[in-house]
């Protein structure tokens, strides 16, 4: 993976030193909260419901064992012994004290990490396919381009005060695991007629209060044009984006109000101006970065042990069936470590679990670790012969849950248990759904299903693109949960459809159960997934299950 | 006709720790909601909020929250404020652990 250059190192150290002084000046009264707030947000420090929260970027979800151990150290020294992996491939610490934050940032800088641009109206952490560099379906590893974008966007003087925050996602595979169609810019690698790799550029996607699927403004952008093209998009947005209304300030609104054709023309015009200004240094840099992302030296060894274990041990087989993905090297597998044990908080890992993951990555995974936007941890390169031992070690630490891609592999934002913006809780809803279906022993029968829960309309839990989406709201002083069905975050992206009136906190789990029992009843065969069934039948059978044949009219 | 004033308390987070605190009638910042001053008069509420907001080295983000009288002192009326009195529901952290 990429390691910091002297320039990165100096920049991060300087920022830590600045922020250390800013905290001192806040604590001695030289800075008011109004003055300090934008400074702390620039460094990822929020004030939440019960405490401060520090959000640390994990660029394109890539992290090494040394960094993972440092996160464990930070969690144990200055927090409550755990960290929360988020839907933006960040990690959040929920309980830091203000005066400890400079020490935490110093500790992060020691391993080439930081919290810069994890807040504010700038280009945020660039996210990528969590199987990048390993997936069998991949055209090219998208992370060198993501790293190029990270370097370019970090402290970019033109783009520090955009109309609103700006999120870029990138995938190197035709199967979109990075939700590129719901980002401000989505980059999806494709090949042209000549077989050369380039990008489909998608602009103006987003979730939140106005969910929109992005528009393709370029079907094929040569790789060499990427940086000037992205800069052109940002430049057009920076000029046109609305600053009068926070809720209409994202690029999705700009695209919507300007029209796809006109915005495409403006981007292309700006690109024509910018392209000649890029003299090739970006490509030189990209070539250097690409070297840093060279694949590991894969081992060539028999995989019989794996095959034998797979046949003999049903627990291992069940885990292998759900938690392994196809690696480009047939002797290898991509391992997803589930942070979704039934009843646990989605995305949370204790310091001990982080250390174990770091050890296992070193021993069995070529020292590579990824964090997924689905709040799990990935070991991208594990030789199949090592899988039985790896699984046993994971299971011992509560990390062996065989549920990836199933019902209990739920995405949930922190919700009103932590977040000051939330309008309802989301974590306990996730916990209870997982616990309930574990009791029913139905999740394998139900098969592939993505449930995503947000605790407010900002949609950090991606509920709009969940097969089942749950949105927690405050309805007249009571928690109320709205359900959407049929959302999809992949290359066939779709925004979920609202079922109707919401459900109270103690009604939401039974409501989800009614939906899934209806699915089991109406599906044509066990092979027809929930999403396929929904696409075939539409919302009607699920509405009937939720509200009864008559209920819907009355309740609305 | 203006709406009737509902009773309030002043709440904020401690600057250093971030902990949720409540302004008492004798000008302390208490971790307990039931020790807060229940303010029944709108003008007095504004004065108390100003007093709280001026304490820049102690607290951050002071605001007025709805409350109602209870047997042991003021109680929150909204679930958000209720959560703030105890901490998150997924772990025994925050006030529910610190003052158990």
Image (cartoon, coloured by chain):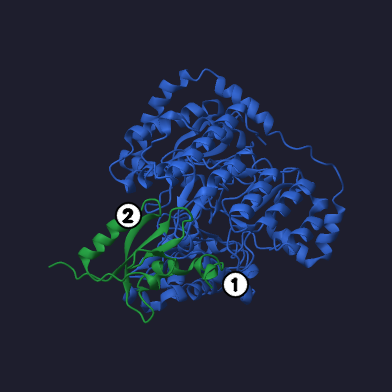
Single out the residue that lies furthest toward the left: B1
Q: In what element is the residue under mark 1?
A: helix
Q: Is B78 left or right of A413, judged from the image as shown?
A: left
Q: Which residue is mark 1?
A: A435
- Chain letter corresponding to the colour green: B
Mark 1: few/some/many CA within 10 Å (<14, 14-19, 20+):
some
Instruction: Work out whether A398 lies above or below A462.
Output: below
Q: Nearer the viewer, residue B59 or A529?
A: B59
Q: Quadrant of the N terminus of chain A?
A: top right
Q: Which residue is mark 2?
A: B53
Separation of marks 1 and 2 at Cα, in angstroms: 44 Å
Q: Quadrant of the C terminus of chain A?
A: bottom left
Q: Disc 1 vs disc 2: Cβ atoms closer than 8 Å?
A: no
- Chain letter of the residue carrying label 2: B
Instruction: Work out whether A396 lies above or below A366.
Output: below
- Chain letter corresponding to the colour blue: A
Is residue A191 visible in the rendered image? The answer is no
Q: Nearer the viewer, residue A277 or A191?
A: A277
- Chain letter of the residue carrying label 1: A
């Amino acid at each position: 993976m990429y390691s910091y250059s002297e320039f990165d190192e100096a920049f991060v150290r300087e920022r830590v030193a600045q922020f250390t002084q800013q905290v001192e000046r806040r604590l001695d009264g030289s800075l008011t909260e109004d003055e300090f707030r934008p400074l702390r947000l620039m460094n990822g420090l929020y004030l939440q419901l019960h405490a401060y929260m520090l959000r640390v970027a994990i660029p394109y979800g890539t992290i090494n064992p040394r960094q993972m151990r440092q996160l464990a150290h930070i969690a144990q020294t200055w927090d409550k012994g755990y960290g929360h992996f988020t839907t933006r491939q960040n990690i959040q610490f929920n309980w830091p004290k203000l005066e400890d934050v400079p020490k935490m940032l110093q500790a992060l800088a020691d391993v080439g990490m930081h919290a810069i641009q994890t807040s504010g109206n700038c280009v945020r952490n660039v996210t990528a396919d969590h199987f990048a560099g390993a997936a069998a379906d991949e055209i090219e590893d998208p992370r060198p381009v993501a790293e190029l974008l990270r370097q370019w966007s970090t402290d970019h003087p033109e783009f520090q005060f955009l109309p609103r925050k700006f999120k870029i996602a990138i995938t190197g595979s035709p199967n979109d695991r990075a939700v590129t169609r719901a980002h401000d810019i989505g980059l999806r690698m494709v090949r042209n007629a000549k077989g050369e790799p380039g990008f489909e550029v998608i602009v103006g996607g987003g979730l939140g209060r106005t969910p929109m699927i992005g528009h393709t403004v370029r079907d094929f952008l040569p790789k060499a044009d990427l940086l000037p093209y992205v800069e052109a998009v940002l430049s057009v947005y920076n000029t046109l984006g609305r600053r009068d209304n926070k809720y209409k300030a994202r690029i999705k609104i700009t695209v919507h109000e300007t029209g796809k054709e006109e915005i495409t023309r403006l981007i292309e015009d700006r690109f024509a101006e910018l392209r000649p200004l890029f003299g090739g240094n970006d490509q030189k840099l990209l070539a250097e970065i690409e070297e840093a992302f060279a694949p590991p030296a894969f081992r060539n060894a028999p995989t019989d042990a794996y095959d034998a274990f797979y046949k003999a041990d049903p627990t291992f087989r069940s885990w292998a069936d759900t938690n392994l993905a196809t690696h480009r090297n047939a002797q290898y597998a991509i391992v997803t470590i589930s942070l979704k044990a039934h009843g646990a908080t989605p995305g949370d890992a204790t310091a001990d679990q982080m250390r174990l993951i770091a050890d296992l990555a070193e021993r069995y995974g070529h020292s590579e670790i990824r964090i997924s936007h689905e709040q799990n941890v990935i070991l991208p390169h594990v030789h199949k012969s090592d899988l039985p031992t790896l699984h046993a070690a994971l299971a011992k630490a509560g990390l062996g849950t065989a549920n990836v891609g199933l019902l209990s592999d739920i995405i949930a934002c922190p919700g009103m248990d932590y977040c000051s913006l939330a309008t309802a809780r989301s974590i306990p809803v996730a916990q209870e759904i997982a616990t309930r279906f574990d009791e029913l022993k139905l999740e394998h029968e139900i098969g592939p299903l993505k449930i995503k829960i947000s605790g407010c309309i900002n949609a950090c839990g991606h509920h709009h693109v969940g097969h089942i989406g749950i949105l927690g709201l405050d309805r007249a002083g009571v928690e109320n949960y709205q359900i959407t069905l049929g959302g999809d975050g992949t290359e066939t992206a779709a925004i979920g459809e609202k079922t109707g009136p919401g459900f109270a906190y103690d009604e939401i789990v039974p409501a989800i159960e009614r939906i899934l029992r209806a699915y089991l009843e109406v599906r044509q065969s066990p092979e027809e997934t929930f999403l396929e069934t929904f696409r075939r039948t539409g919302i009607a059978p699920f509405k009937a299950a939720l509200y009864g044949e008559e209920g819907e009219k009355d309740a609305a | 006709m203006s709406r009737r004033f509902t009773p309030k308390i002043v709440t904020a987070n401690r600057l250093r720790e971030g902990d949720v605190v409540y302004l008492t009638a004798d000008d302390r910042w208490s971790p307990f909601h039931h020790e807060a001053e229940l303010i029944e008069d709108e003008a007095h509420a504004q004065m108390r909020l100003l007093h709280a907001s001026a304490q820049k080295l102690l607290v951050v983000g002071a605001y007025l929250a709805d409350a109602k009288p209870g047997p042991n002192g003021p109680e929150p009326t909204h679930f958000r404020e209720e959560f703030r009195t105890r901490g998150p529901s997924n772990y025994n952290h925050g006030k529910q652990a610190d003052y158990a």
